Amino acid sequence: MTAINDPALYLKDTRPGQSIKRIRSVCIDASRVPAYVIHELNGCGVCGAACLLAFASESRISFDDSLDRCLAIAENGFTRTVNGTTDYYTKLGKEAPFIRKCLNTAAAGLSARSSLFAKRRAVREILAGRPVLLNIGISGQYRDHTVTAYGLEEYAVGPSGKKFLFFKVRDGYTKEDRYLLYRGILGISATYLKPKV
C-alpha cells in the first residue's frame, strides 16, 4: 500500500512527462475535522466516529472527549475481546447504528446513514460541507480500513485531460493530510451525517 501525501507529486511520479493541472480543490475547514492517531486495536471506525462527532457537536466538544464517548458506546455492544484486549473492529453494516448512538450524546439534530454508492455519496457530502467515513475493503492506499474524508482534489493529466479525483482524508496513521485515489477503491461503503427526521 502506498500512502499519498501530495496528489500532484503522486501523478508526476506515476505519469512522468505528462502535464498535470489541478482543476478542482474543495476542503471542509480542517479545524472542524480533527486529526487523530489510532491507538486502539482496530480502532479506525471508532476514531472516525469520534471525528464526525467532534465535527457535528453543537457544543464543539474536543476530539478526546468525543473519543471517550465513542469508546464507551463501542464497548457496550459493538466490540469483542481478543486475547484479553478489546478489539474495536466495527463490522460492515454496524457503522451507522454505532455512529447514531455516538451522535446522540452531543449532536441533537443529526443522525447517520450508510450507503453502498459510497464514492458518489462521499463527493456529494464533501461538496455540501460535511465529512464522511469511508469504509474501504481495498485500495492502492488502504486495506480493510476506515478513513474520514473531508476534501477533494481533482486533476487533469496529459493532452487528453484525463481526470483523476482524490479524497483528502484523516487516516489515523498520521496527523498529516493523506489522499485516497477515487479510482481503484474496491469494497467500499460510506457513512454520512444526515438531519434527524
Image (spheres, rainbow, N blue to C red):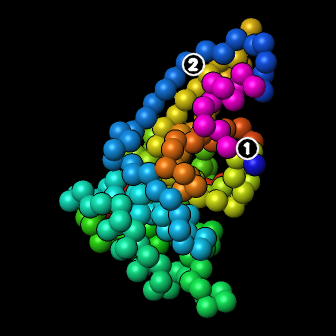
* Residue at x 62%, y 30% (from the top left corner): 7
Q: Is residue 57 above or below residue 31?
A: below
Q: Is residue 34 magenta?
A: no
Upstream in sequence: badge 1 or badge 2: 1
Amino acid type of the residue that numbered disc 1 sits on in the rendered structure: Thr
Query: Which quadrant would residue 165 be assigned to in this image?
Result: top right
Asked if marks 1 and 2 touch (Cβ < 8 Å), the reply is no
List x then y, in percent, for residue 25: 49, 26
Amino acid marked by disc 2? Arg
Q: Residues within 10 Å of mark 1 (few under 14, many from 20)?
A: few
Left or right placement of residue 61 versus residue 184 in this view: left
Q: Is residue 136 visible?
A: yes
Pointer 2: residues within 10 angstroms few (<14), some, or many (20+)? some
Find residue 184 and report its horizontal and vertical position in percent. Answer: 75, 42
Q: Residue at x 75, y 25 (%)?
A: 13
Q: Is residue 5 magenta?
A: yes
Of all residues, the one furthest to the top in this rendering is 159
Q: Is residue 75 left or right of residue 116?
A: left
Residue extent of the magenta highlight: 2-13
Residue that mark 1 sits on = 2
- Return the residue found at the far bottom: 84
Q: Position of residue 63 (x, y in %)?
A: 35, 61
Q: Which residue is more in the foreground, 102 or 175? A: 175
Pinpoint residue 2: horizontal percent, then vertical percent: 73, 44
Q: Is residue 157 above or below residue 37?
A: above
Q: Which mark is residue 22?
A: 2
Q: Which residue occupies the foreground of this view, 112 or 90?
A: 90
